[in-house]
Image: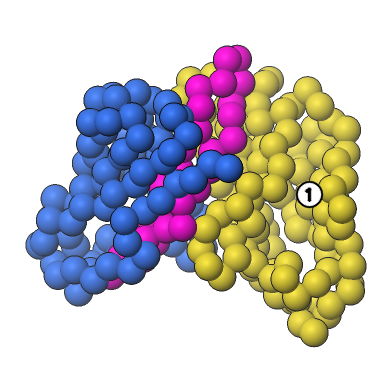
Amino acid sequence: DVKVTQSSRYLVKRTGEKVFLECVQDMDHENMFWYRQDPGLGLRLIYFSYDVKMKEKGDIPEGYSVSREKKERFSLILESASTNQTSMYLCASSIIAGGGTDTQYFGPGTRLTVL
Amino acid sequence: AQKVTQAQTEISVVEKEDVTLDCVYETRDTTYYLFWYKQPPSGELVFLIRRNSFDEQNEISGRYSWNFQKSTSSFNFTITASQVVDSAVYFCALSASWGAQKLVFGQGTRLTINP
């Protein structure tokens, strides 16, 4: 089974702090994704990566950055946390499917509260 | 642009009732993929089904069934003889077959099965 883990289930930070959210997958997947989930808005893509050191902006990248130094690990960084970044953050991974879209597998999520 | 609409924000039924969750999508692509995910109270998104645009056959898996109709751009999900364990938020999602395989999610439907 695919296993995607996230470093914390719950996190509380102060406005202006630098925040790191870590995601690790154990299935040698090329693609990794960071989403945020807010009530009534579903999941929205923040950033994704299709290879080590490669990254692309998703739909809502403002206020976030990412790092992918190793294939299995994808980090989401909030350079200066703000209260409007209070949300549930979900990481996902998938293989690069030839000619098609493969299934994304999700981690358990990190519920971040910024005070 | 791609869009997924789940018009039902919340549904509540009594155990053993059948329930259908609606999903309507918009895309200009001729080849695309549709997904359903379940998010139980634990928070992790669980993959249920993936369907490509060329396969309009209905799918049945135990008490779950999916009805894909390209003519109405819908991909509806039916649970037969619902059980309390089916209580969760359900998301429908859409992906193009090319590029970065990003998922576009609907807003989600919160399903509550009452004993």
* Image: B2 above or below A89: above
Q: Is residue B59 visible?
A: yes
Chain represented in blue: A
Q: Position of residue A98 (x, y in %)?
A: 58, 15
Q: Quadrant of residue A38?
A: bottom left
**Crowd around label 1: few <14 · some 14–19 · many ≥20 (10 Å):** some
Write down the region rendered in magenta.
A87-113
* Magenta region includes residue A92: yes
Q: Nearer the viewer, residue A46 or B23?
A: A46
Q: Quadrant of residue A33?
A: top left
Q: Nearer the viewer, residue B44 or A5?
A: A5
* Image-based side of A42 in relation to B86, left or right: left
Q: Quadrant of the N terminus of chain A?
A: top right
Q: Position of residue B5 (x, y in %)?
A: 63, 50
Q: Quadrant of the C terminus of chain A?
A: bottom left
* Magenta region includes residue B3: no
Q: Position of residue A15 (x, y in %)?
A: 13, 67
Residue type at mark 1? Asn
Q: Position of residue B43 (x, y in %)?
A: 51, 63
Q: Chain of mark 1?
A: B
Chain represented in yellow: B
Instruction: Say which residue appears at 53% left-offset and 67% top-offset.
Output: B42
Instruction: Say which residue appears at 71% left-offset and 42% top-offset.
Output: B49
Instruction: Say which residue appears at 32% left-offset and 61% top-offset.
Output: A8
